[in-house]
Image: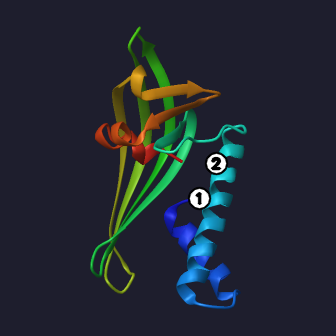
Amino acid sequence: MDKRKIMKKAVELAKQMIGDWAARMALALKMVWAEAKKVVANEVGAINVKEGYKAVKLGDFETEQEEDLQGPKRKWIRKGTIELLRETEKAIQVEMRYTEIYRLYKSNGELRREKTEDKKYIEWLPKSQIEVQDGYIFVKDWIAEEKMIGIFAN
């Protein structure tokens, strides 16, 4: 569940409650975040994703990423596979092969431009910053951002 869905669900839940809006929203967000963590844990096979980590599923994946600029919006849709290529004593090499669809929208929501590309991305991840378990790679947030593997995370 992405942050946008979490926020939407929290707003819907808070609207059903009575009392101060800030307090209702805080409670709703806590409830929805707890539910989202359980969903990720169930998808991972009842393994809790630790605080400060991203979960990257090996095998087939599909992710969406949106960015709102002041007016126009950009969206990326990625579909492909993630595989472990090699492993050394200190690191693993991961390959992401995917098709990326990039869409740029006008301020009024109309599609302005769309571009589709096939991409391949190979990256070494240090074992000291990751855990591989049950078909998932748990990557510390900072390395996920630095190595840009976070865009493939659930």
Write the residue at 50% across / 51% down: 63
Query: Where residue 51 sits: x, y (%)?
Result: 51, 45
Q: Which numbered disc flags the more N-terminal residue, 2 or 1?
A: 1
Query: Where residue 2 sits: x, y (%)?
Result: 53, 60
Give the answer, above or below, for where 89 lies relative to 37: above
Query: Where residue 111 sits: x, y (%)?
Result: 37, 75
Q: Circles 2 and 1: CB distance less than 8 Å?
A: yes
Q: Name the residue under label 1.
A: 1
Q: What element carries label 2?
A: helix
Label 2 crowd bin: few (<14), some (14–19), many (20+), radius 10 Å: some
Answer left or right for 52 relative to 114.
Answer: right
Q: What element carries label 1?
A: loop
Give the answer, above or below, for where 12 lies relative to 55: below
Which amino acid, mark 2? Val
Write the residue at 27% across / 79% down: 70
Q: Which residue lies furthest to the top in this view?
A: 89
Write the residue at 65% across / 27% down: 134
Q: Cα distance, mark 2 to mark 1?
A: 8 Å
- The image quarter containing residue 152 is top left
Give the answer, above or below, for where 109 lies relative to 123: below
Q: Mark 2 points at which residue?
A: 40
Give the answer, above or below, for where 11 lies relative to 88: below
- The image quarter containing residue 145 is top left
Quarter the N terminus occupies:
bottom right
